């Protein structure tokens, strides 16, 4: 008898273990939960009861309200969306309804029928559900309830409704403290349950949590509780529970990660839950980019950090004022013959993000004569979108201005932070980057960093300046204002040689200050062990004139090398230092990073990968283009390895240089009309024609007006008056 019991127990144990083993499956290494919002297995419980007394927020024409229920008094009744719910990802409406006679109820949105219900004299339960995929516009203002059948008697409505419950959610962009993120905005008292098969090794849930403000006039603090619960056939377990206090004036994102390793490979129901005492329609909570990632597969992809040092001249990297950048370059591939596409921030960065020359993307500052847009067209696929499609977590940290999300630069980034706090003692971008990397080092990331630190006006820390220049050209604080520079640029002030040298010293001190902060970032990467699996690409978006040619100062003025030559340094893990002199352009960054990410390029681009061998046909026969358009100014240029040609539209003049004999572009050979000039002129003419012919994207673009705050930023940088 004991032997039989022992056998039975063994059978039960093996059966139990077998069931557990069968439950183990292999899920994908990355699961983006927002992509499952419309999956039938996803449960979204965010219902808000609509009472008779509270129906006024939804009541359009054709309704009457009673004590116990709501009635449709006309054949056509309008159900309104409160403003807080107009931009929706998905919408659900539950209700009970009856009609004195059998009749059909048709519900339409934006003239599209989304449901038909058969109403009867008995109360029955109905449910309406639709998503933004069903609509032609993202904004929903109303539902139309249309009844068929004969007109009812005067005392009889078309239909009665009770127990109405509504829920809505939005997958979109939410901004807290100038940190814009892709997020799921949903009622503060809600829960969402996703059915997923977890990755097989070390799955971890990542998300940010925040409280978007819907009413500026409600400064009081609100308390929220959020939790993560996992449900299996064996039971439920709460993995995380936090209380958060938030008020509109200081609302920030809070980043979380939850270890799911105990449930690796299993099919589970993952619940994101929030609780709040508030029942106000304007009370929402946002879950930013909830993702499950198998951190054990981290080494499969290199991290990518793309660093823009706005206005850094190419000759400053090895000038002695950037020791950390110089040391970094000595372990990297240095491109000594690199050029921007436009000597100004907006257009140049657009070329980096799209892999297109300005003639192709047609994004530039306003011009009176050429049709352009200042907003990156949504139809263009940015490098951030390429990274996101390749499975990277994408983030940008910038100083705003002409790299603001307003101009479309946030496109493809799950996070886009425009440094809200400036400090004279640190580079905000690099400081924030250190914190960000510490939080996100467990998953492959694409991080874009941009800083105006070395951009005018120049105001380096006094201690840094005095360390470099104990005997400066002028005995005054190291501060060059935009007002003074504007007088120089406008010809109202002719600077002395000492003043010119003092401007250069202030700029060099800014370069040194940035470089010291850059060194701290590199040390942080090494501490985290990320230096062994991170690609770092550093570039300047354009150069700067420092009175190199008479009294010309600044950028956006000429197409001479001082303005269009840029630093370009690529660090690949395990790759030795290399100096390259083949001709490259900033449009080449796009295909380079796409290749390193193993990503597919789905749209035409102008760039050639920087990894292309210098002696290849693509490189040796190449010509690159750049241009400058602003106000009445319009200049276009073409360059090969040997020659350069520029056409000035305002003056009706062309210039031609033999770069082999005249690398400083001092001797214009256009009067001699060499044969090479004619062939380059034909290529440049074709480019100019493309540049001045507006594309369909540009013709359809609707340029928005910058906010007062953004315009003040641009004014401080000298871009607008």
Image: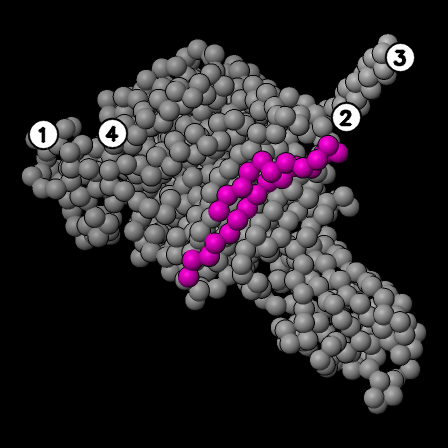
Front tag of 3 and 2: 3
The residue carrying mark 2 is 23
Where on the picture, by quarter, is residue 386? top right
Where on the picture, by quarter, is residue 599? top right
Under circle 3, the secondary element is loop
* x 15%, y 40%: residue: 478
Q: Earlier in the sequence, mark 3 or mark 1?
A: 3
Front tag of 2 and 1: 2
Q: Earlier in the sequence, mark 4 or mark 3?
A: 3
Label 4 vs label 3: CA separation?
Answer: 86 Å
Label 3 vs label 2: CA separation?
Answer: 33 Å
Label 3 vs label 1: CA separation?
Answer: 98 Å
Q: Earlier in the sequence, mark 4 or mark 2?
A: 2
State the residue in front, 398 or 24: 24
Under circle 1, the secondary element is loop
Q: Which mark is residue 111?
A: none
Mark 4 residue crowding within 10 angstroms, few (<14) / some (14–19) / many (20+): many
The residue carrying mark 4 is 512
| Depicted 484 relative to depicted 126: above or below | above
The residue carrying mark 1 is 470
């Amino acid at each position: 008898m004991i032997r039989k019991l022992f056998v039975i127990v063994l059978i039960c144990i093996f059966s139990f273990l077998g069931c557990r083993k069968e439950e183990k499956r292999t899920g994908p290494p990355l699961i983006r939960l927002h992509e499952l919002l419309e999956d039938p297995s996803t449960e979204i419980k965010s219902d808000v009861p609509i009472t008779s007394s509270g129906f006024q927020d939804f009541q359009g024409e054709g309704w009457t309200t009673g004590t116990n229920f709501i009635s449709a008094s006309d054949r056509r009744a309008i159900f309104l969306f409160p403003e807080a719910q107009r931009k929706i990802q998905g919408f659900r409406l539950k209700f009970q309804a009856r009609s004195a006679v059998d009749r059909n109820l048709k519900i339409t949105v934006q003239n599209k029928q989304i449901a038909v219900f058969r109403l009867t004299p008995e109360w029955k339960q109905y449910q309406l559900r639709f998503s933004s995929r069903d609509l032609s516009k993202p904004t929903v203002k109303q539902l139309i309830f249309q009844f068929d059948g004969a007109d009812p008697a005067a005392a009889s409505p078309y239909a009665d409704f009770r127990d109405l419950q509504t829920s809505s959610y939005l997958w979109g962009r939410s901004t807290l403290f100038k940190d814009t993120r892709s997020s799921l905005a949903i009622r503060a008292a809600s829960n969402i349950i996703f059915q997923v098969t977890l990755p097989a090794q070390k799955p971890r849930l990542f998300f940010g949590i925040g409280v978007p403000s819907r009413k500026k006039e409600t400064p009081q603090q609100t308390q929220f509780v959020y939790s993560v619960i996992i449900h299996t056939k064996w039971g439920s377990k709460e993995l995380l529970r936090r209380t958060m206090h938030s008020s509109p004036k200081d609302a920030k994102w809070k980043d979380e990660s939850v270890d799911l390793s105990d449930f690796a490979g299993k099919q589970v129901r993952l619940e994101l839950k929030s609780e709040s005492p508030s029942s106000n329609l304007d009370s929402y909570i946002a879950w930013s980019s909830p993702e499950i990632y198998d951190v054990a597969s981290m080494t499969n992809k290199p991290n990518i950090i793309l660093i823009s040092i706005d206005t850094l001249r190419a000759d400053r990297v090895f000038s002695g004022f950037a020791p950390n950048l110089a040391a970094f370059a000595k372990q990297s591939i240095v491109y000594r013959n690199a050029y921007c596409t436009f000597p100004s921030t907006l257009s140049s960065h657009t070329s980096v993000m799209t892999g297109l020359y300005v003639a192709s993307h047609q994004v530039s500052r306003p011009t009176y004569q050429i049709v352009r847009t200042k907003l990156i067209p949504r139809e263009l696929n940015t490098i951030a979108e390429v990274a996101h499609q390749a499975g990277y977590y994408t983030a940008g940290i910038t100083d705003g201005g002409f790299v603001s999300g307003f101009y479309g630069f946030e496109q493809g980034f799950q996070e886009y932070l425009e440094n809200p706090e400036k400090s004279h003692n640190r580079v905000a971008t690099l400081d924030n980057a250190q914190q960000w990397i510490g939080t996100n080092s467990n998953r492959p990331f694409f991080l874009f960093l941009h800083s105006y630190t070395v951009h005018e006006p120049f105001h380096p820390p006094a201690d840094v300046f005095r360390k470099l220049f104990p005997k400066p050209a002028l005995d005054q604080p190291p501060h060059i204002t935009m007002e003074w520079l504007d007088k120089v640029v406008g010809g109202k002030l002719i600077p002395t040689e000492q003043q010119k040298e003092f401007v250069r010293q202030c700029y060099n001190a800014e370069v040194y200050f940035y470089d010291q902060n850059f060194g701290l970032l590199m040390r942080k990467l090494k501490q985290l062990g990320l230096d062994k699996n991170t690609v770092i690409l550093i570039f300047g978006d354009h150069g700067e004139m420092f009175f190199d040619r008479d009294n010309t100062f600044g950028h956006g003025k000429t197409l001479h090398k001082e303005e269009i030559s840029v630093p370009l340094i690529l660090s690949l893990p395990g790759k030795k230092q290399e100096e390259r002199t083949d001709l490259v352009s900033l449009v080449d960054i796009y295909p380079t990073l796409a290749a390193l990410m193993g990503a597919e390029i789905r749209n035409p681009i102008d760039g050639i990968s920087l990894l292309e061998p210098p002696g290849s046909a693509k490189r040796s026969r190449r010509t690159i283009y750049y241009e400058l358009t602003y106000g009445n100014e319009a200049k276009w240029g073409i360059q090969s390895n040997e020659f350069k040609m520029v056409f000035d539209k305002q003056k009706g003049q062309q210039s031609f240089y033999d770069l082999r004999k005249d690398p400083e572009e001092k001797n214009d050979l256009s009067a001699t009309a060499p044969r090479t000039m004619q062939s380059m002129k034909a290529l440049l003419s074709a480019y100019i024609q493309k540049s001045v012919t507006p594309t369909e994207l540009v013709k359809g673009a609707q340029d928005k007006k910058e906010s007062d705050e953004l315009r003040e930023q641009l004014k401080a940088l000298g871009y607008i008056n």
